[in-house]
């Protein structure tokens, strides 16, 4: 089986041992070292490490002091953590449609979704390519909206040379399958020193110093053990990303011209980091998306459907009073057609050839 992803953190062993031998295994100097390195990648002065990507989103919304009924506009084509975080923070979720070309929020649809209760715009930089921040940021400014970037899958991605996570409050995931992982973990990035200070207090049970409580907070801390796992990956992030880009380019070249198969595009001005390589299996394909996935699995090609439904299209959200569903025809169609293929840095040239050959055989190309 050629896996959809491979987790390789062997380089972290020396730093992990250093933490274990130090006796400081909770949040300490290794977390600070990790935060400094991450801030440099995101192009901001402040990075606040937390215990996962979902809590990063929750904390980012909480520090904006929203009131009951205030809305966050986001995409329905995303991992459910995006929606869960909005609800956990007490806000109301409203949705705009996406663009088929990049799987991210369509600025025109966002403009139509904004109401007088909208306070936050939350683009999701899906699969490793940023949303159209050149249009979304001016739109947010026009309506006085805060921008919270769900950059869980986009560490190192850029729009017009500016990194994901530098446009407002950036929220990243460090889950096991992400381009940079600490097994579990997250990071919040910002250029606002006051916001960064509030986030650090919030993640530490509301304490500025021991037993000096300033707000009702949370335990969102990352451990030094987790940080030690992530630091070596940040140090070699450009090398790992280059490998993903080479693999994506080879896949796109090999899969070109197959009837019923749309390969992903890198849009002008954007640097894609290829968290996933996601194709669309259209009505013209020899088999359906689900049949395609099953046949690939039978032949030893790992794959994943990210995501099979829109986030509000589940019973637990369908009648939720703070989930305002709307028609999203592009996102609905993409959810029916999207399938991700292996693109991780550990792929060999022979494995890429096998993926291409197998896809062509399954689709009769």
Image: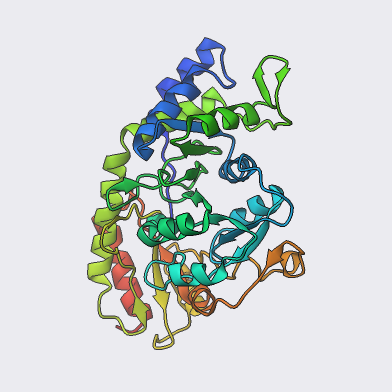
- Compared to residue 18, the image places residue 70 above or below, namely below
**Does residue 356 appear in the picture of this structure?**
yes
User: Residue drawn at (29%, 63%), measured in percent from left and top?
Assistant: 266
| Near-viewer residue (11 or 72) | 72
| Near-viewer residue (299 or 233) | 233
- Compared to residue 229, the image places residue 179 above or below, namely below
How are the residues colored? Answer: rainbow
Asked which quadrant contains residue 63, the reply is top right
> Residue 66 location, x and y as percent?
66, 47
How many numbered circles does the render carry? 0
Asked which quadrant contains residue 206, the reply is top right
| Near-viewer residue (117 or 96) | 117
Asked which quadrant contains residue 212, the reply is top right
Quadrant assignment for the C terminus: bottom left
Quadrant assignment for the N terminus: bottom left
**Does residue 300 appear in the picture of this structure?**
no
> Residue 153 location, x and y as percent?
45, 51
> Residue 146 location, x and y as percent?
53, 50
As drawn, is 171 to the left or to the right of 245? right
As drawn, is 259 to the left or to the right of 99? left
- Compared to residue 42, the image places residue 132 above or below, namely below
> Residue 135 location, x and y as percent?
38, 62
- Compared to residue 24, the image places residue 97 above or below, namely below
User: Residue drawn at (54%, 34%), measured in percent from left and top?
Assistant: 195
As drawn, is 132 to the left or to the right of 331? left
């Amino acid at each position: 089986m050629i896996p959809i992803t491979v987790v390789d953190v062997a380089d972290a062993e020396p730093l992990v041992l250093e933490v274990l031998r130090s006796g400081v295994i909770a949040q300490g100097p290794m977390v600070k070292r990790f935060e400094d390195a991450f801030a440099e990648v995101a192009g901001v002065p402040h990075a606040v490490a937390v215990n996962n990507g979902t809590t990063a989103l929750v904390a980012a919304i909480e520090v904006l002091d929203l009131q009951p009924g205030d809305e966050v506009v986001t995409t329905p084509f995303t991992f459910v953590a995006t929606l869960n975080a909005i609800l956990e923070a007490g806000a109301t979720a409203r949705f705009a449609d996406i663009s088929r070309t990049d799987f991210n929020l369509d600025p025109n649809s966002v403009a139509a979704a904004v109401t007088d209760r909208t306070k936050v715009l939350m683009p999701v930089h899906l699969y490793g390519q940023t949303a159209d921040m050149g249009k979304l940021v001016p739109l947010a400014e026009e309506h006085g909206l805060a921008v919270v970037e769900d950059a869980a899958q986009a560490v190192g991605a850029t729009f017009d040379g500016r990194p994901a996570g530098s446009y407002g409050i950036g929220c990243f995931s460090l889950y096991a399958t992400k381009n940079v992982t600490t097994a579990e973990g997250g990071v919040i990035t910002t250029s606002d020193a006051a916001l960064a200070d509030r986030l650090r207090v919030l993640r530490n049970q509301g304490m500025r110093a021991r037993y000096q409580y300033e707000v009702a907070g949370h335990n969102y801390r990352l451990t030094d053990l987790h940080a030690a796992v992530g630091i070596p990956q940040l140090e070699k992030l450009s090398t790992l990303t280059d490998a993903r880009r080479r693999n994506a380019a080879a896949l796109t070249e090999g899969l070109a011209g197959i009837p019923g198969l749309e390969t992903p595009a890198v849009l002008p001005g954007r640097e894609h980091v290829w968290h996933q390589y996601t194709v669309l299996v259209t009505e013209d394909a020899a088999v359906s998306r689900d049949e395609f996935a099953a046949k690939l699995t039978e032949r030893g090609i790992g794959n994943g459907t990210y995501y099979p439904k829109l986030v509000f299209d589940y019973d637990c959200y369908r009648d939720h009073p703070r989930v305002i569903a709307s028609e999203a025809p592009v996102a609905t169609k993409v959810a029916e057609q999207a399938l991700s293929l292996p693109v991780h840095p550990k792929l060999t040239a022979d494995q890429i050839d096998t993926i291409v050959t197998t896809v062509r055989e399954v689709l009769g190309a």
